[in-house]
Image (cartoon, coloured by chain):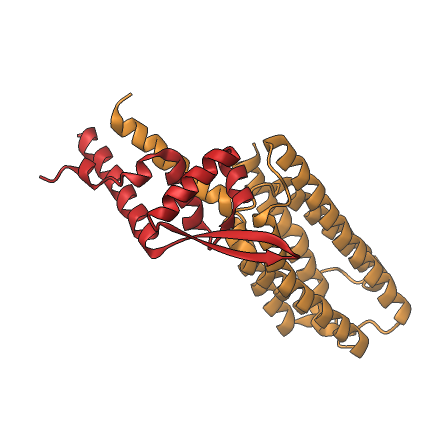
Chain colours: A orange, B red
Amino acid sequence: MEQHQTYQKDLESIRKLMERSVKFISLSGLSGILAGIYALIGATIAYYLVHYPASPFDYRIYSIQSGEALIQLSVVATVVLVGSLLTGIWMSARKAKGAGVKIWDATSKRLFINLSIPLMTGGIFVLILLSNGHLELVAFSCLVFYGLALINASDNLYEEVRYLGYSEIVLGLISAAMPGYGLLLWAIGFGVLHIIYGSVMYKRYDS
Amino acid sequence: MKNPFDSLDKMLEHSARLHIVSVLMANESSDFNSIKELLSLTDGSLATHIKALEREKYIMVTKSFVDRKPNTKYKATERGRSAFKKHLEAMEEVIKQQKK
């Protein structure tokens, strides 16, 4: 083999190595698709709990009044969140095992910290909103803090995640201006976008 | 015309050392085991290469204790970073010239 071909191979291997040492490549696009499906199911249940029989595309001018509905909604949201996280962890562990790499290493630790700080802040903020009855800002807070968390962690993830983060923030801001579309925007942000970006990532990196 | 082979860095011509510096270029700092796993090197050979790079002042070592266990971190120095960049440029130059 000629010298320049060896060097070309060397450069390629260095590029891959640098990427592998920074990025958490075990995240599967499939877990994004599944998380999106869970979110859409959750949003549909929420719609029947509080919105039905009005059309889901109508602008809501009243907010939730009963404490019971609020508790039911919180349970649905928690199930969606925990289900998505467990799916993500399980599928990443599977992908990591298939590739023969460890799932819990320096990169995933850093990813965990970078994701956690904005997410915990947002989670606590949402709990405060719920206890103070500022329900119109819940969808906004979920979307915006999630978007910020993705952007904060995007150095350790594939590039697409950064754009998903931007999209979530835009949707969040729209929902701040139009809180009556909160559930619809939440369903787009956590359901539709996860399915779209998950499919793109699945096609690019998993197959 | 200057021969690009002259610009290649003797220290980094060894692929294991080049790979160690690559990891430290991409990350602020890294520890022994992380580098070992990424590069699939043995303890002995990684230690030897790290010593060589340290002697050349391409990387620096910080030792501290976490939960009373020694925690050694490696970082690329400014000197190591510019050597790495120069070496990669030289490699690219070789590729360009030989392709013609």
> Given the current orientation, which residue lies at the most extreme right position?
A68
Using the rendered view, name the quadrant where residue A131 is placed: bottom right
Quarter holding residue A15? top left
A160 and B80: which is toward the camera: B80
Q: Residue furthest top?
A: A1
Residue at the (79%, 79%) spot, across then down? A132
x, y (%) of residue A104?
A: 64, 45
Q: Looking at the rendering, in which quadrant would you find the C terminus of chain A?
A: top right
Residue A13 showing in the rendered view: yes
The N terminus of chain A appears in which quarter of the rendering?
Answer: top left
Query: Could you say which is closer to the camera, residue A158 or residue A70?
Result: A158
- Asked whether residue A53 is in view, the answer is no
Q: Is residue B2 above or below residue A191?
A: above
The one nearer the camera, A11 or A157, is A11
Residue at the spot 60% in from the left edge and 44% down from the top edge: A198
Q: Position of residue B73 (x, y in %)?
A: 50, 52
Q: Is residue B25 left or right of residue A56?
A: left
Q: Is residue B92 above or below residue A109?
A: above
B93 to A119, vertically: above or below? above
Could you tell me residue A164's position as x and y percent? 56, 54
Viewer-nearest residue: A178 or A112: A112
Q: Horizontal and vertical percent for residue A134?
A: 75, 77
The residue located at (62%, 41%) in the rendering is: A28
Corner quadrant of residue A125: bottom right
